[in-house]
Image (cartoon, helix red, strand yellow):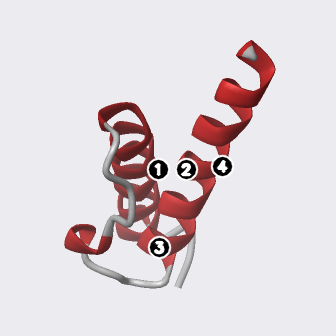
């Protein structure tokens, strides 16, 4: 069970990162649960930060 939960949250973070790289707004978060939404937003923020630093176009 722990592994499944961690994988789901890792996937939420990765999806948020991809959304941030593609320039989607943070309001597009598809998750309703607090944990998954938090991970998605964390990934989104990391991607936006990376884009602003010039790591990606």
* Number of residues whose C-alpha sits closer than 10 Å to that of mark 1, classed few (under 14), some (14–19) or many (20 or more): many
**1 relative to 45, above or below:** above
Labels 4 and 1: the sequence-earlier one: 4
Report how far apart the C-alphas of labels 4 and 1 lie in the structure. Answer: 10 Å
Using the image, tell me which numbered label, if any, was put on residue 19: 3
Where does the image place residue 5, in percent across and percent down from the top left?
65, 27
Identify the mark at residue 11; answer none if there is no mark.
4
> Viewer-nearest of labels 2 and 1?
2
Q: Are marks 2 and 1 in contact (CB under 8 Å)?
A: yes
Calculate the distance from the C-alpha at mark 2 to the C-alpha at mark 1.
8 Å
Tag shown at residue 43: 1
Q: CA distance from mark 3 to mark 2?
A: 11 Å
Local packing at callout 4 (Cα closer than 10 Å; few below 14, some 14-19, many 20+) is some
At horizontal 54% and vertical 47% (from top left) the residue drawn is: 13
**Callout in the foreground (4, 1):** 4
Pointer 3 and pointer 1: residues touching (CB < 8 Å)?
Answer: yes
Upstream in the sequence, badge 3 or badge 2? 2
Tag 3 secondary structure: helix
């Amino acid at each position: 069970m722990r592994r499944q939960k961690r994988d789901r949250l890792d996937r939420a973070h990765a999806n948020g990162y991809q959304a941030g790289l593609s320039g989607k707004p943070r309001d597009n978060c598809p998750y309703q649960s607090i944990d998954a939404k938090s991970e998605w937003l964390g990934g989104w923020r990391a991607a936006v930060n990376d884009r602003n630093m010039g790591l990606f176009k």
